[in-house]
Amino acid sequence: MKRRAFLGAAAGTAVLAGCKSGHEIEGGFTGVDVARGHALRDGALQAGNPPDVTRRTRVVIAGGGIAGLAAARALRLAGIGDFVLLELEDSAGGNSRGGAVNGVACPLGAHYLPVPGDHAREVQDLLEEFGLRRRVAGRWEYDERHLCHSPQERLYFRGEWQDGLLPVQGVGEATLAQYRLFSQRVEALRREARFVIPTLRAQTAPLLLSLDALAFEAWLDREGFTDAHLRWYLDYCCRDDYGAGMAHVSAWAGLHYFASRHGFHAPGDDNAERDAVLTWPEGNAWLMRRLADPLGERLRTAHVVTRIAERRGGVEVDVFDAATRSRIRWQAERCIVALPVFIAARVVENPPDVLTRAASFIHHSPWLVANIHVREPLADRPGAAPSWDNVIYGTRGLGYVDARHQALDPTPRATVLSWYRPLGPSAIDGGDGRRQLLDRPWTGWRDDLMEELSVPHPDLPALATRIDITRYGHAMSIPAPGLLRQLGAPKQVRAGRLAFAHGDWSGYSIFEEAFTRGHLAV
């Protein structure tokens, strides 16, 4: 038996031994009301029925994710206070919501924001408003308390921890040569093409369209990037950012991951400095709450949008209020549709061609986030020190982040580890990930993460006290080959009195894309 397989089997034995010893780990599913969303899908909430009450406002925002919250902020900045924001879940924020396990704050989804580049002007303004950056002696400086504390990331590889996520411990010269070659290729493409965030400020040049037409894996084959360690890392990056493996995302997306931000730096590169990221114990919920709190009663949670229709001189938006079990019709001058495209296509009456085309092409990756409360710090394997982001080579999950890594108090104590598992199509996870996500009991996911994380942390089963699992059936859109050509120029999308704003319109889900589109929709 190979060493890695033996360690995995030993970890599984440790989990079973912990259960037999009488130590019970509490837990379950939390954070997302799956039944509420499926009631709309299955027709239980019939659109068009007479409303119980009719209300009026100037603007309706349908969808309370980051795009919808950004639109609400933009309306307030424009002096427009007569609006309502409608959100299906019990709290706003979409993939950027947060929670707590046994009193320890933790993310339920997105857990960081890279320091934005010059093209993301709207996000830069937001960070300035929130006091996260200020100009000192003519230069922008970020508040160190909110930047990721050091050490930032490490990889469990060949029986020990190493700094960074690119496998380097004991790899051969051929692997290092491929790292250097890929770094040079990314840098050349950065100079040749316009890889920018947000994508609506990009120019859809022929080079980008040619990369968009090809799967990333096929491009790597064509370019001769065959090294197994390099390809594992690149596949990990695709699953991390897009929820699907490199065989299922375009070469444009795979290269965009590096070329739009920090590049790709081979070991020994004098300029190999990882871009700073902003992060908090509760993840991007820190930002979300500061966007949602000023809205007061204008934010209506547990409100399921069932129909959006243009009428002469305005729009009608029908809603089911899950708390009161009543049907409400909002009449407004305009509607900002900040919903995923597959939902927007379902609820918009007589949807425009651009929406139906996008909904037919864009597919979404299911995700799972497990927050594991441990009553004391875990024992560690040799190598690099515990970091904010901790990844295990060759596993199905994406590793875990430590919620207390940002704490200013260094006293060792209980913490929460947030473990991420994409279930989109990949060489690691084939089959119907969404069905697996819905049908499998939480204890099955518990056993998966315990087996994976017990390899570097064999004491995890004994120290874990509770596991809360959040499931996202349609967490993020997958930038599949042909997406740029199908969506056309990645600009703002409008139709009559409707403005569409969601990360889906950029082809993938990150804070900067959703926020910019929500802001510009206003």
Image: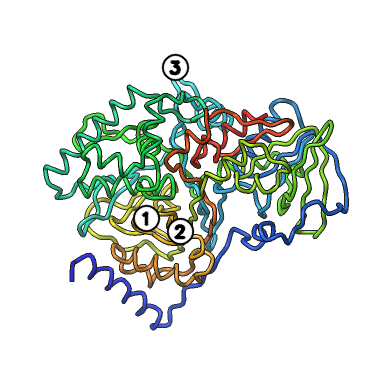
Residue that numbered label 1 is attached to = 399
Q: Quadrant of the C terminus?
A: top right
* Numbered disc 1: secondary structure: loop
Whichever of labels 2 and 1 marks the residue nearer the N terminus, that label is 1
**Marking on residue 88:** none
Mark 2 and mark 3: Cα distance apart in space = 39 Å
Q: In the figure, is residue 461 to the left or right of 161? A: right
- Image height of 460 relative to 308, above or below: below
* Numbered disc 2: secondary structure: strand
Proximity of marks 2 and 3: CB atoms separated by less than 8 Å: no
Q: Identify residue type, mark 1.
A: Gly
Q: How many marks?
A: 3
- Image height of 204 relative to 13, above or below: above
Mark 3 and mark 1: Cα distance apart in space = 40 Å
Whichever of labels 2 and 3 marks the residue nearer the N terminus, that label is 3
Q: Identify residue type, mark 2.
A: Val
Residue that numbered label 2 is attached to = 416
Q: Position of residue 512 (x, y in %)?
A: 51, 35
